[in-house]
Image: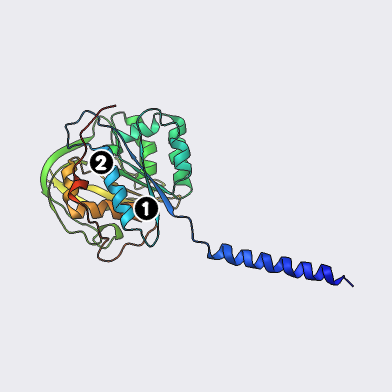
Amino acid sequence: MLPRWFLTSLLCGLAILIGAGDSIAKEPLRPKRIVLIGQAPDGHPPGTHEYRAGAGLLAKLVRQVSRNAPIQAIVVSADGEWEDGPELLDGADAAFLFVSEGAAWISKKPERLAAFQRLAKRGGGLACLHWGMGTKDAKNIEPFVKLFGGCHGGPDRRYKVVDVRTELPHPKHPIVQGIEPLDIHEEFYFKLKQPDPGGTLKPVIPLIQVPIEGESHTVAWACSRPDGGRSFGFTGLHFHENWNQESYRRLMTQGVLWTIGREIPAGGVEVPVEKTDLVPPPQKSE
């Protein structure tokens, strides 16, 4: 027979383990972490291609709608060598890209592209905005499309400044909840490079379309990737002043939230801003 002191010690040890397990089970989950990648001006006129201001505004919108389920929205700069970038992505649940010629920027360094691919492989969310989906060199199109579901790339890429009314081909999709058709002055990219319907990638879901040159073109989309992750893109917001449009702010916020699996309410999320949020700082090239 085992001595009483041994049995007492064993029972005490089991009680400690059970209590610890109960504590671990009740510990809140780690907040989702989104890396929002902006950049210094790229030579466009002030009020356009406001990468840093746009990334910062979107970060604020994401944070304020996630109080009950916290999200860490981290704004970082893509300028320079971006040496700590791959490590940041390895600790992230999603990435938002708003930089100059983003598809080329991602493929510029093998380790950078590999970090985005690792994020995608583990089901991470990916979102891109305007020139953040761009590349002049067609060689960068294929790897970007596999990640984000769409690319404004190659020598045949198309864009145009238009005054149009937006269309919602899939109004029940979570990303466009609470969004109405909008009359807008905008530079849109169109005739995007997107997954081949006969390939391994799932076809994208068009969320916003606009009439350009007599045809209806997709300018915002959602994509459920084969790796289990989600991607979202929008070709607009060339003009920073268009963040004034509530539907634009809601579209971008809900697009990012959807990529990390957050539920979108039927009426859409609230996206209030202060007037100062909509004024970009003076541009200073680096």
Among the 4 quarters of the image, the one containing residue 95: top left
Three-letter code for the amino acid on which mark 2 is drawn: Ala
| Residue 2 horizontal/vertical position (percent) | 87, 70
| Quadrant housing the N terminus | bottom right
Mark 2, residue position: 53
| Quadrant housing the C terminus | top left
Secondary structure beneath dot 2 equals: helix
Give the class, few, some or many, for how many residues have Cα within 10 Å of label 2's Cα (few <14, many ≥20). many
| Residue 267 horizontal/vertical position (percent) | 24, 65
Q: Residue at x 28, y 38 (%)?
A: 52
Residue 257 sits above or below residue 106 on the image:
below
Three-letter code for the amino acid on which mark 1 is drawn: Thr
Task: Kindly tell me whether residue 205 is visible in this rendering.
Answer: no
* Discs 2, 1 touching: Cβ within 8 Å: no
- In-front residue for pair 159/16: 16
Give the class, few, some or many, for how many residues have Cα within 10 Å of label 1's Cα (few <14, many ≥20). many
Q: Residue furthest right?
A: 1
- Image mark for residue 259: 1
Q: Residue at x 68, y 66 (%)?
A: 16
Residue 283 sits above or below residue 172 on the image:
above
Secondary structure beneath dot 1 equals: helix
| Residue 79 horizontal/vertical position (percent) | 35, 30
Q: CA distance from mark 2 to mark 1?
A: 22 Å
| Residue 185 horizontal/vertical position (percent) | 11, 45
Among the 4 quarters of the image, the one containing residue 178: bottom left
- In-front residue for pair 23/167: 23
Q: Residue at x 34, y 55 (%)?
A: 257
| Residue 151 located left or right of residue 160 | right
Q: Mark 2 or 1 closer to N-term?
A: 2
